[in-house]
Image: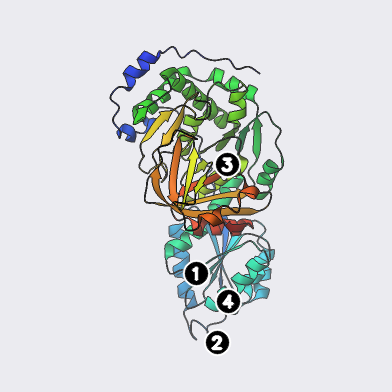
Amino acid sequence: MPILKRDTGLSRRAFLAGCAGCPAMAACAAPSAAAAAPPPVPVPEVKPRVRLVFTHIPPEKPTWPYQGYDYEGRKKELTARLRQSCPAIEFLPATVHNADEARKLLEADAEVDGYVVYMVGIWTGAGMAIASGGKPTLFVNDLYAGCGEFLTAYARARRQGLKVAGVSSSRWDDVVQAVRAFETLKKLKASVILDVTDRPLGAEARAIAEVFGTPVERVSSEEINAAYQKADLNEGRKWAAAWIKGAAKVVEPPREEIERSGAMYVAMRDLMTARKAQAITVDCLNLFYGGKLPAYPCLGFCQLNDDGLVGACEADLQSTITMLVMAYLTGRPGYISDPVIDTAKKQIIYAHCVAPTKVWGPNGPRNPYHIRSHAEDRKGASIRSLLPLGQITSTLKFAPTRRQVVFHQARTVANVEEDKACRTKLAAEVQDPWKLLAEWDRWGWHRVTFYGDLRQPVETIAALLGFEVIVEG
């Protein structure tokens, strides 16, 4: 279906005049405030019900932590701390002393979303009995109290492929972060992904619905073009003006092209609002090259990601669900890329024409960016984000059909100046670039990069979902 282009009514001269003198760091005014648009699609408000199970043997018996230990006082303390630290979770405390009691608890727990098994003592057998029930289960080791049973039960549960994650840390935040994964699981079940494509949905979409509980709904090119035609032109112009004002510089696109991107953003957001969706991915290259898309969605994707939602490239559902999981788990946006590996410099260069500008989340600082044309065809409008350097990044992708997640980490060192390939090019140093060469046939070219050392939350959510983590470098 041919697209109908909208006349934005502004000349290149007007655009250049409006952009003159943009300072490099003018970026930091938030486009959302400047555009005065309606609020984005809300993240689902959910409250998972989690059974908080304390396991220990009777206090009169000699064992770790010690005979006569005040288990009741410790359980009250931990329950209060968890409720204060995780107010979005409904905790249902219980105590079990052995595997039989644990199995009886399971019989009464049809409605709970999962289990936190807090091992405040040892040698009950309760943890394995609960994990064998099949629901997502988190083992927490109360150090110097539950260690022996935690270590043996956790290893056994993982070896058996049970949905069990574990925390054995003196840092309370590690416990809280792991427990909050239950919020992520619940939010995923209350979310929707839109896939804008003329191709039928396949096995990946079915697996996402089955594994994460997140339905994927197809949107045709006709539907997105209809939404584009209905989009509020004045609002699209406001978004374009905000993006231009915030940019360190605008290189190729005329203002009317950026305004088409603004209208495309409004169209995508309107579709998401109508379908109650928190994520959208567009088969942008095929549709744009085929004359079925009036504008690239790149700038709109950046806005969605900066606002805490998900806009993902190329109808890549693996990357989309990865971004949605991590947005809920960490509050940070993902950066899809087509990486380049330079073994001489021990670098991986993450390259794409879309990237967020608020890598620490919607309330974090904004880094500078340039508005460019799309790299491959030199058309439309896209973004070069000058991403923060000297930072640890975690790069990953979930594969729902295989129930695996691939993962590596690196340290950012440069925003690469190179006319070839995509506009944003973030170079990062890795320990073993040769190991990174070994996994691309199974996972495809794309990876999704997030700022921060996120190994623990990735391991936790993967375990609760029953995924295997493949460390590729």
Image coords of residue 378 (percent x, y): 49, 25
Q: Label 2 vs label 4: CA separation?
A: 16 Å
> Dividing the image into 4 quarters, which one contains the N terminus?
top right
Say which amino acid is labelled 1: Ser
The disc, 3 or 1, on the residue closer to the chain's N-terminal end is 1
- Quadrant of the rendered structure where residue 236 is? top left
Q: Label 3 vs label 1: CA separation?
A: 31 Å
Label 1 environment density (alpha carbons within 10 Å; few <14, some 14–19, many ≥20)? some
User: Which residue of the protein is positioned furthest toward the front in this rendering?
Assistant: 344
Residue situated in front as seen by the camera: 362 or 22: 22
Q: Is residue 100 found left or right of 361 in the rendered image?
A: right
Dot 3: element: helix
Residue 121 seen in the figure: no
Residue 320, disc: 3
Mark 2 vs 3: CB contact within 8 A = no
Residue 61, disc: 2
Please tell me whether mark 2 or mark 4 is closer to you in this view.
4
Q: Label 3 vs label 4: CA separation?
A: 38 Å
Mark 2 vs 4: CB contact within 8 A = no
Dot 1: element: loop
The disc, 4 or 1, on the residue closer to the chain's N-terminal end is 4
Dot 2: element: loop
Q: Residue at x 58, y 76 (%)?
A: 149
Image coords of residue 232 (percent x, y): 49, 19
The residue that mark 1 highlights is: 168
Say which amino acid is labelled 2: Lys
The disc, 2 or 4, on the residue closer to the chain's N-terminal end is 2
Q: Label 2 vs label 3: CA separation?
A: 52 Å
Say which amino acid is labelled 3: Thr
Residue situated in front as seen by the camera: 79 or 341: 341
